[in-house]
Image (tube, helix red, strand yellow):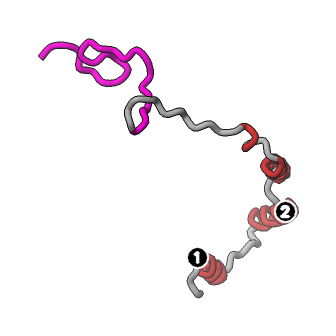
Amino acid sequence: MSGDNRIGTNAVSGIARAHAARRMSDNGNTPIAAPSVAASAYDSAPVASLISTARAIADQGPPVDLDRIASLKSAIAGGSYRADAKQIASSMMTFFGRNG
């Protein structure tokens, strides 16, 4: 067998598609129009308000207690921080839905 048998945007058996493929209607005679999305669907006030609120929350950053972090760093560095393994395990079991 001879000829180009590559599939894709290249020619297949020497024949190239002149334009993009179109989906045809059930009767096969007319192309189906692509669905259109109204621009107003994305410009509505509730959506804009939610986006604005989301941006404001994101700009605040995560809630961080800097004094608590400094205290924990100091305790760890000084060797006075003690972790209660039983309490940690119990909290993990509760968090993952198991009774501790």
In the rendered view, tell whether residue 71 sits above or below residue 42. below
Residue appearing at x 53%, y 33% in the figure: 33
Badge count: 2
Q: Which kind of residue does numbered mark 1 sit on?
A: Phe
Residue 10, numbered circle: none
Q: Is residue 45 left or right of residue 87?
A: right
Q: In the picture, residue 42 is in which quadrant?
A: top right
Q: Is residue 5 left or right of residue 77?
A: left
Residue 65, numbered circle: 2
Q: In the picture, residue 74 is in which quadrant?
A: bottom right
Residue appearing at x 78%, y 41% in the figure: 43
Image quarter in which the N terminus is found: top left
Of residues 61 and 2, the one nearer the viewer is: 2
Q: Is residue 93 left or right of residue 76?
A: left
| Residue stretch in magenta | 1-26
Image quarter in which the C terminus is found: bottom right
What residue would you read off at disc 1? 96
Mostly what secondary structure, the magenta segment? loop
Q: Which kind of residue does numbered mark 2 sit on?
A: Asp
Measure the C-alpha gap from mark 2 to mark 1.
25 Å
Q: Is residue 19 left or right of residue 50?
A: left
Specify whether residue 10 is painted magenta. yes
